[in-house]
Image (cartoon, helix red, strand yellow):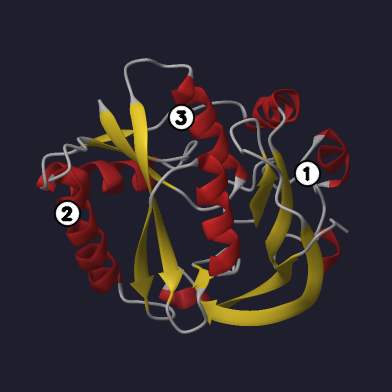
Amino acid sequence: MKTVLNWSSGKDAAMAYFLLQQNTQYEVVQLLTTINKENDRIVMHGVRESLLEMQATRMNLPLEKIYLPSSPANEIYQMKMESALTKLKTQDIKAAVFGDLFLEDLKAYRESQLAKIGMEAIFPLWKMNTTELVRKLEATGIEAIIVCVNEKCLGKEFLGRKVDLDLLDDLPANVDPCGENGEYHSFVYNAPFFSDPIRIHKGEIVYKKYPAAKESDGTSGFYFLDLIAGNTSS
C-alpha cells in the first residue's frame, strides 16, 4: 500500500519511517510537512525549509509542503491538510503515517479526519515505551538533536543536545524521554536511510511565545535553536 509520511524532520517521524521500511505491506512514497509561510520554517520545530529539503533529498522522496500562517486556526489547518491529502489520494496513496506515541485524542482526531477522505491512518510507534524508543534510535543509527524546548518543561541549555541515552540521564523526571507531551522537538541530521549526513552549524537561540493549547492557559514560551547547513558539523 502506498503511503504518505507526515514528516516533522524529527526523530519520531524518522523511526516511523525506519520501521515501515521493514514492513512489506506499506511503501512510503511521499513526505508531507507543514511550513510556517511567514518565516519559511517547519511548524513548531522552527527548522529552516532548506534543511527540510536536504532531508528529503537524502531520503530520495518527493516532498509536499503545506504552508500555514503563524498560529493558524484549527479550521485553516484542517482545510489545508484535507486539500493536500485529497490531492495525494489521486496518486493512489491510500494511507498516511504518523509518529504519534500515546496521545489518544490526537490519534482519534487524525483517524477521523482521514476517514472523511477515505484514507487510513498508520501509527508504527503507537504505545511504544519512550525510553526504549530512544535506545532504538541509538541502536539503528538515527541521529537527532534538540532544536526546540518548551520553557515550562526544559531550559534552553538542552538545545543542541543529541537525543541519546546520555540525554535520558539529564532529563527531569516529569519530562517524557521522547518529548511526546511537547516538551521538546528534534531535527534528524543522520540516519541509515540518508544517502549521507547533513552537516550543520548551531546558530542563535530565539525565544517566542505562542497561544497555549487551552485558552485558559494564556501563552506558552519556547526556545528555538537555529540550525544552519555547513561543511562541518559543530
Q: CA distance from mark 3 to mark 2?
A: 27 Å
Label 3's element? Answer: loop
Tell me the crowding category of disc 2: few under 14, some 14 to 19, or many 20 or more residues within 10 angstroms, Cα based.
Answer: few
Q: Is residue 97 visible?
A: yes
Label 2's element? Answer: helix
49 in relation to 21, above or below: below
Q: Give the x, y percent position of residue 232.
A: 85, 57
Q: Give the x, y percent position of residue 180.
A: 57, 46
**In the drawing, what numbered circle is on residue 3?**
none
- Determine which residue is flagged by label 2: 87
Mark 3 or mark 2, whichever is nearer to me: 2
Amino acid type, residue under disc 1 in the picture: Ala
State which tag comes first along the sequence, 3 or 2. Answer: 2
Q: Is residue 155 visible?
A: no
**In the drawing, what numbered circle is on residue 126?**
3
Residue at 82% over, 53% down: 161
Residue at 48% over, 17% down: 22
State which tag comes first along the sequence, 1 or 3. Answer: 3
Amino acid type, residue under disc 3 in the picture: Trp
Tell me the crowding category of disc 1: few under 14, some 14 to 19, or many 20 or more residues within 10 angstroms, Cα based.
Answer: few
- Going by the picture, which residue comes out furthest to the bottom? 38
Q: Give the x, y percent position of residue 69.
A: 38, 80
102 in relation to 229, above or below: above
Q: CA distance from mark 1 to mark 3?
A: 22 Å
Q: Give the x, y percent position of residue 23.
A: 41, 16
State yes or no: discs 2 and 1 in contact (Cβ < 8 Å): no
- Determine which residue is flagged by label 1: 173
Q: CA distance from mark 2 to mark 1?
A: 43 Å
